[in-house]
Every structure is written in structure tokens, then in C-alpha cells.
């Protein structure tokens, strides 16, 4: 028996991770929050260009498609480079797109600058930010994600007033130019996404090399029982003994090592195999085998529908308040948007802690949140008084956070750590496919019906559809549990 010592890196839970959370919050505040500000920034300009809700829906949905179809490259790019470099690149692209949009004079120019360039930038920021937080946290992941995404809510609460003041003072072009400059703060926030290996702790491991026919026993301070007899097909077996701070010893069977001729024959057979085809390499690079999992497909399809309905509501909300039955002023509209975003922030900071203590998973929270959100948004469409809209916005904002925070957490809860970047990318692509169909349909429905209320009700019916689609599986899991 031969014993040797080696070093191992241990991933901390937290530590610098809280600085990563701060960086994600700052990046989201000046970048991701822009999605809900589209109607406020571009609404009047698109009206002056002669384009109604369908034109705004086209730009917004195109941006969402580009953002989500970037999922084809985000997984491999994050693996090849790092989430830090990808997030910095995304912040730069978002800023450049907004600066170019400030000089746009037609719909296609806004499409190229905002939908394509800024959309690609936001598509790079979202998964890299989540992977950064997910890498640093395991037990407190929901709380960390909620705090990181609170930056988006803070931006949605403060930025409407900033945009309103800027529009009154500088008009569309000056406002978009300044917002583009503020988006560069995302570069500073992304710089805090330090690689995890910079903060790993080094611990010692003792490795025993046991010869043929020797027994591997379970080394434990409380019990020394036989674990299993090794296989005679191998010359030796390597096991790792990790000494923790409490002096308890864990046994991990790493792998069987053989240096005889059968092993060499195996290596020879592997090297003689034909190279994988182009399609096989494509499937491997993007981990498309996930698409064979029916539960994953159900999860990502439901997430995509809720996401698309949320994007549409965020775009329609300021139009509804200013042009619909409420007929609110620009200042009152900004206040309603801020109240909704403020309740969203409170929910992102408190709801993850509540669900963690109650032992409620991310998907379960998302499941019931979707049902509640449909009724909360429908209640807004009934109102035409300012005070009641404020109250309904408060309720909607708190419920909305339960679905937004748990979007990626639902994927993370189902997939392994290695699959996560690819699963997030495939989920983004699926969201892009749903946005370009469902989102454009809802925009057409608003112009065809001439009613904001009808389009809001129909978008909420899709939320109910997701609830019904997931209900049998969720009930079956609850019965088994």
C-alpha cells in the first residue's frame, strides 16, 4: 500500500460572492432595467414616426428574439472564455446600441441599433450574470439571486423618473444618449465577476494506492466497516481520503486505474473510432441532448410563455396608463411604474428568504406565482382611478418578482452545474421563438381590437395555460413526495 498527499481546491459558499452579487445588481440596474423603459423612451418617438403599437411591438419583440437567440452562443462562449469577459462585452454592446439609437430617424434604424446591438448585449449579460452568482453560492443561491436581481427592480423604480426628467429637458435624442452613457456602468459592475478559482481554498488530501485483492474499507472515526472488494480486472485502485476541519475522514473512490494490456486495448479502440460528424459535434457543443428530456421541454416552454407575456405587459403598461381609460400624465405614469418596481424589489429581497425557510422550491414558487400574476394583471385592466391603479401596481409588482427571480433558478434546480450554461442558452432560444410568435400576435391583437384591456386579458390567459400544463406533473410529484 502506497500513500501520497495531494492538494485540492474547495469552492467557498459566499465570500467574494457577495461582491459578485453587488456587481450583478449594478449591471442589471443600468442595463436589464431598460427593457421595461422601452415604451417610455421610444413611445412618443415611434408615434411621431407614424408607427403604432404594432411598430413598438416589432422593435421590442425583435430585441427579445436577438437577446434570446444569443443563447446559441452564450453557453459555449462562457465555457471558452469566462462569465466576466462575456458580461463586460454585453454591457459595451448595450451602451453602443443605445447611443446609436439616439441618432435614429426611422424604424429600421431603431431596429438595427436597439433590437440587434443592444439586444445582443442584453443576451450576453443575463446568462453570464446568473452563472457568476450560481458559481459562488449553493445553499443561499435563491437569496443571492434575489438580491442580485433587486438591481433590476431598483432600476425599474428609479429610471422612469430619470427618463421623464430627461425627456422634458432634452427630448428623445438627448435622453437616449445619456441612458446609453449610464449603461456603461455595467462594465464596472461586470468587472466584479472575478473567476471562482481566484478565491478557492486549498486543502490536503491523502491518496492510498491499493494493490490487487486488497480490500477497501470505510475509514471513519466512528465505524470501521468493510465497504467492498475491489475488482480483479484492474491492477490497482485509487481512493482519496479527505481530512476535514473536524478530523473526520471521508472515503471517495475516484476511479479504477489499470496499466495492463486490456487498458491499452481500450485506448487503442477509442483512438481508432471514427471522428464524430459535424452534427454530432454541434450537438455536443450545445448539449442538445437536453431537448430529448420531456420534462425539460415542458419547463422551458412554460418559462418562455410567461417571459413573453411579461415582456409584452412591460411594453404595454405605460401605453395603457397614458392612452387607455386611465389617461394619466407622464409623471403619474412614471409613479405607477416606480411603485410596481418598488414592490418588485421588496419581493426579491424577502420572498427568497421566506420560501427557503418554508422549504418551497423555485419551480413551485414560479408555478403558483404564475397563477396569481394572471389575476393581478387583469385587475389593473379594470381600473381607471389613479389610487386603485397604484394599489394594483403594488400587488402586481410583489407577485411578479416570484416569477422573474425563479426563471433561471427553475432551470438550475433541474439541471446539473455542468449542464447549466447550455440549459440557460437553450431556454433563451426557446424564449426567442415564443416571443416572435406570441409577442407579435399580442401586438397585432391590440391594434386590431383597439382595446388595451382585451390584449391584457388574452396575455393572462397564456399564464393560466402554463399553470394548467404543469398542474398534472406538479400534482404527481406532490403525491409521490
Image (cartoon, rainbow, N blue to C red):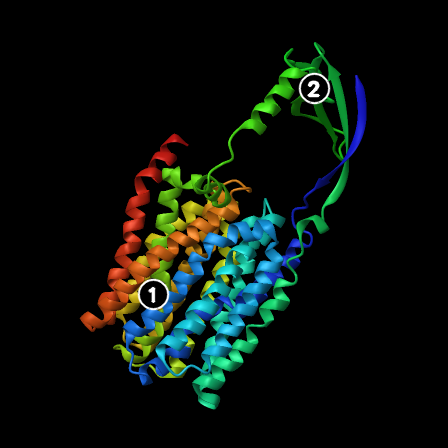
- Occupied quadrant, residue 320: bottom left
Residue at left offset 35%, top offset 49%: 302
Q: Which residue is mark 2?
A: 259
- Coordinates of residue 230 in the picture (x, y in percent): 65, 14
Badge 1 marks a residue whose secondary structure is helix
- How many marks are shown on the rendered structure? 2
Neighbor class of circle 1 (other Cα within 10 Å; few <14, some 14-19, many 20+) is many
Lateral position of residue 199 relative to residue 352, left or right: right
The numbered disc on residue 312 is 1
Which of 271/394 is in front? 271
- Occupied quadrant, residue 68: bottom left
Badge 2 marks a residue whose secondary structure is loop
Q: Where 379 falls versus 480 (above or below)?
A: below
- Coordinates of residue 126 in the picture (x, y in percent): 51, 59
Residue, far left: 449
Image quadrant for the C terminus?
Answer: top left
Lateral position of residue 469 relative to residue 365, left or right: left
Amino acid at each position: 500500500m502506497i500513500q501520497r498527499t495531494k492538494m485540492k481546491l474547495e469552492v467557498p459558499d459566499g465570500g467574494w460572492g457577495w461582491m459578485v452579487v453587488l456587481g450583478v445588481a449594478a449591471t442589471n440596474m443600468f442595463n436589464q432595467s431598460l427593457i421595461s423603459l422601452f415604451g417610455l423612451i421610444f413611445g412618443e418617438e415611434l408615434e411621431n414616426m407614424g408607427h403604432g403599437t404594432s411598430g413598438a411591438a416589432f422593435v421590442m419583440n425583435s430585441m427579445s428574439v436577438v437577446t434570446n437567440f444569443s443563447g446559441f452562443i452564450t453557453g459555449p462562449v462562457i465555457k471558452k472564455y469566462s462569465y466576466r469577459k462575456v458580461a463586460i462585452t454585453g454591457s459595451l454592446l448595450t451602451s453602443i446600441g443605445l447611443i446609436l439609437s439616439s441618432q435614429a430617424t426611422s424604424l429600421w434604424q431603431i431596429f438595427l441599433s436597439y433590437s440587434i446591438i443592444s439586444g445582443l448585449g442584453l443576451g450576453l449579460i443575463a446568462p453570464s450574470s446568473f452563472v457568476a452568482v450560481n458559481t459562488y453560492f449553493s445553499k443561499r443561491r435563491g437569496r443571492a439571486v434575489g438580491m442580485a436581481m433587486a438591481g433590476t427592480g431598483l432600476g425599474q423604480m428609479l429610471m422612469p423618473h430619470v427618463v421623464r426628467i430627461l425627456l422634458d429637458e432634452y427630448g428623445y435624442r438627448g435622453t437616449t444618449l445619456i441612458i446609453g452613457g449610464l449603461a456603461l456602468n455595467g462594465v464596472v459592475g461586470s468587472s466584479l465577476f472575478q473567476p471562482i478559482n481566484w478565491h478557492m481554498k486549498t486543502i490536503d488530501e491523502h491518496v492510498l494506492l491499493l494493490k490487487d485483492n486488497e480490500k477497501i474499507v470505510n475509514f471513519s472515526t466512528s465505524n470501521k466497516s468493510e465497504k467492498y472488494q475491489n475488482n480483479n480486472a484492474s491492477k490497482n485502485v485509487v481512493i482519496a481520503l479527505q481530512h476535514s476541519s473536524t478530523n473526520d475522514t471521508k472515503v471517495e473512490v475516484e476511479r479504477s486505474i489499470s496499466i495492463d494490456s486490456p487498458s491499452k486495448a481500450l485506448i487503442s479502440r477509442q483512438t481508432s473510432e471514427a471522428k464524430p460528424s459535424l452534427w454530432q459535434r454541434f450537438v455536443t457543443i450545445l448539449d442538445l441532448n437536453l431537448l430529448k428530456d420531456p420534462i425539460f421541454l415542458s419547463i422551458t416552454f412554460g418559462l418562455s410563455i410567461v417571459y413573453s407575456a411579461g415582456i409584452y405587459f412591460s411594453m404595454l403598461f405605460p401605453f395603457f396608463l397614458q392612452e387607455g381609460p386611465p389617461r394619466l400624465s407622464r409623471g403619474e405614469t412614471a409613479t405607477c411604474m416606480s411603485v410596481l418596481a418598488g414592490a418588485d424589489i421588496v419581493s426579491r429581497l424577502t420572498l427568497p428568504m421566506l420560501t427557503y425557510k418554508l422549504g418551497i422550491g423555485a419551480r413551485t414558487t414560479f408555478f403558483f406565482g404564475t397563477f396569481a400574476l394572471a389575476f393581478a394583471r387583469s385587475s389593473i385592466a379594470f381600473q381607471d382611478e389613479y389610487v386603485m391603479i397604484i394599489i394594483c401596481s403594488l400587488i402586481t409588482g410583489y407577485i411578479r418578482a416570484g416569477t422573474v427571480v425563479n426563471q433561471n433558478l427553475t432551470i438550475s434546480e433541474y439541471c446539473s452545474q455542468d449542464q447549466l450554461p447550455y440549459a440557460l442558452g437553450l431556454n433563451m432560444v426557446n424564449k426567442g421563438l415564443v416571443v416572435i410568435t406570441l409577442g407579435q400576435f399580442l401586438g397585432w391583437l391590440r391594434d386590431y381590437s383597439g382595446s388595451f384591456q382585451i390584449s391584457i386579458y388574452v396575455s393572462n390567459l397564456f399564464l393560466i395555460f402554463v399553470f394548467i400544463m404543469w398542474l398534472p406533473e406538479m400534482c404527481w410529484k406532490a403525491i409521490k413526495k
